[in-house]
Image (cartoon, rainbow, N blue to C red):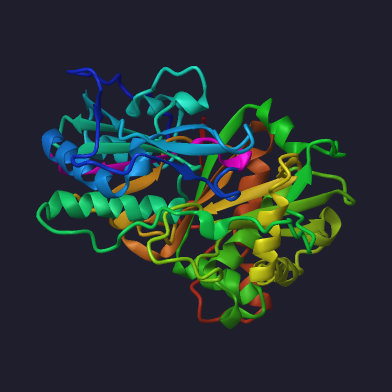
Amino acid sequence: MLQYVELPDCFYPTPPVTIPPSAPTPKQSLYLSNLDDQKFLRFSIKYLFLFKKSVSFDTLKSSLARVLVDYYPLAGRLRTSIEEDHNKLEVDCNGEGAVFAEAFMDASAEELLESSKLPNKSWRKLLYRVEAQSFLDVPPLVIQVTSLRCGGMILCTAINHCLCDGIGTSQFLHAWAHLTTNPTTNLTITPFHWRHVLRSQNPAQVKLPHPSYTRTKLTPQVDLFTWMQTQSLVATSFTFGPTEVLRLKKHSRVPRNTTTFEAVAAHTWRSWVRSLNLGPTVTVKLLFSVNVRKKLNLPEGFYGNGFVLACAESSVWDLVSSDDNFHHVVKLVQQAKGDLSEECVRSMIDLLEDKKVRTDLSTSLVISQWSRLGLEDVDFGEGKPVHMGPLTSDVYCLFLPVVGDAKAVRVLVSVPESVVERFQGYMMINESWEKDHGDGDVNNTNNINGVACVMRK
């Protein structure tokens, strides 16, 4: 079990600077689609990369200025819309720039590697905090590069979720890394910034039900999300290697048609619900991000939020009443993905014209998949990261890449301290599954690789 590691303070040799684009960029207002402008996304995604070797600050700042020419909205500032509803946001593409902080920490990459798998509050030191009156006053891109005693570095980025999703983040970071190592070349993918391709229809046409959403005037019978905000949360981490993934797939009874995500998501959702001891009639939901770029035929390099939340739902009883109904849970996840037709996504975009509509978090586990985005492959010229993950942990669940094992996935989620042991127990893969379903070709284990490391937030 990992132990709590309180990081030393960062030393800032110079004040943070603002890095503008290195060449003139369009001065305009950038429309945000309804998928961008959800209140659910009004926060910054905070990524952490740990490298064994560092790149000079000046080199990183120079290539950042260059990449911001193409990714100029990240150098702008969010504001309420001038022409549309004041509840709607837009980007003022003014070329003001991204915040870049240089720091030093008296620690080594090896010392930080193991403990980095479970974020705690002290890790927030690794990202410069911009003092701001509101969410709108925080620049869309904030970066801190921290040099380590061993010659390694930590790169932390905070990217406003209203401007892009995980695919967009990966696209930007790879572009920045490309220009760092190849400063005289052009980008391999040109970002497409216009979100008008995701405009709602006029008039709006909501033709289908959308269980991912609810209206604020409705009061849920059970509100787990609000309750969890009052609890002492504990970060848990579980790594599913190829053997464990195969066992889950076989337990689904349709292994050839079950993806790694579907199997691990179904298992995590079911374990989460079982640990909370909810009433059998309570309806619980699993919300998970699905990329819809191909489904909507969005342009190559589309740089905005190109995902929607699929929703699987079930009564607690139907989800957990039997140890032998895992295949039913997997089918719920598969059906939720299958329901996301182009018509469904367009109807969802139209639904979000109603600003009273919000994501239904009341009894939902939300999963965001970072494990297939290529984030672990970002290389600024001194090698790929030995670790990548979030800066902090919260009640949302992340599926993270495992450096060095493309077939593995790491599940990170914080749960109330009162249910940690139950959750750990349910996340254990029972070896009787393989006996019941003839998984003779799988090595016997009664554990998940690297299972159940826990730490207070």
Which of the two residues, 58 or 315, is positioned nearer the viewer here? 58
Q: Is residue 447 visible?
A: no
Give the residue at x 87% y 39%.
221
Q: Is residue 319 left or right of residue 279?
A: left
- Residue 282: where, in percent of width, then height? 86, 48
Give the residue at x 59% y 52%.
367
Which of the two residues, 418 or 445, is positioned nearer the viewer here? 418
Asked if the stretch drawn in magenta spans residue 24, the answer is no
- Residue 38: where, in percent of width, then height? 61, 43
Q: Is residue 46 visible?
A: yes
Q: Is residue 128 left or right of residue 151?
A: right
What span is in magenta?
38-55
Asked if the stretch drawn in magenta spans residue 40, the answer is yes
219 to 32, vertically: above or below: above
Give the residue at x 68% y 44%.
422
368 to 230, vertically: above or below: below
- Residue 319: where, in percent of width, then height? 78, 60
